[in-house]
């Protein structure tokens, strides 16, 4: 099951969210660091994220897709 992590730039911080999840992650460096942090919180392998930039607002919004592999599945697999 594919997972979509969305990041937005607000207040000098990138905030990552997943629809239906209460957990969030933030980072002041860039959107990918915020998405990776949230992936780790959710038990997902952060190296499997694929960036899908918003062409109209590339700095403000970025979406990352993940195939849904858990960290344990990638390590054992």
Image (cartoon, rainbow, N blue to C red):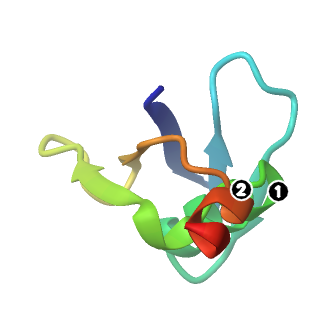
Q: Residue at x 74, y 63 (%)?
A: 40
Residue at which label 2 appears:
38
Residue at which label 1 appears:
41
- The image quadrant that residue 72 belongs to is bottom right
Q: Residue at x 43, y 63 (%)?
A: 48
Q: Residue at x 77, y 56 (%)?
A: 25
In the picture provided, is 37 more to the left or to the right than 67? right
Across and down, in percent, residue 53 comes to: 23, 51
Q: Residue furthest left?
A: 55
**What secondary structure is marked by label 1?**
helix
Q: Nearer the viewer, residue 1 or 46?
A: 1
Q: Nearer the viewer, residue 14 or 43?
A: 43
Quick check: can you spot residue 13? no
Across and down, in percent, residue 41 comes to: 82, 56
Pointer 2 with pointer 1, Cβ within 8 A: yes
In the picture provided, is 71 more to the left or to the right than 74? right
Q: With respect to residue 19, does 59 lie above or below? A: below
Q: With respect to residue 34, does 55 lie above or below? A: above
Q: Nearer the viewer, residue 20 or 48?
A: 48
Q: Disc 2 versus disc 1: distance between alpha carbons?
A: 5 Å
Q: With respect to residue 14, does 67 lie above or below? A: above
């Amino acid at each position: 099951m594919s997972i979509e992590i969305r990041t937005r730039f607000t207040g000098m911080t990138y905030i990552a969210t997943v629809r239906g999840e209460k957990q969030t992650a933030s980072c002041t460096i860039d959107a990918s660091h915020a998405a990776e942090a949230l992936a780790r919180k959710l038990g997902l392998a952060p190296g499997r994220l694929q960036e899908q930039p918003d062409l109209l607002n590339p700095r403000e919004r970025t979406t990352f897709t993940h195939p849904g592999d858990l960290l344990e599945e990638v390590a054992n697999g």
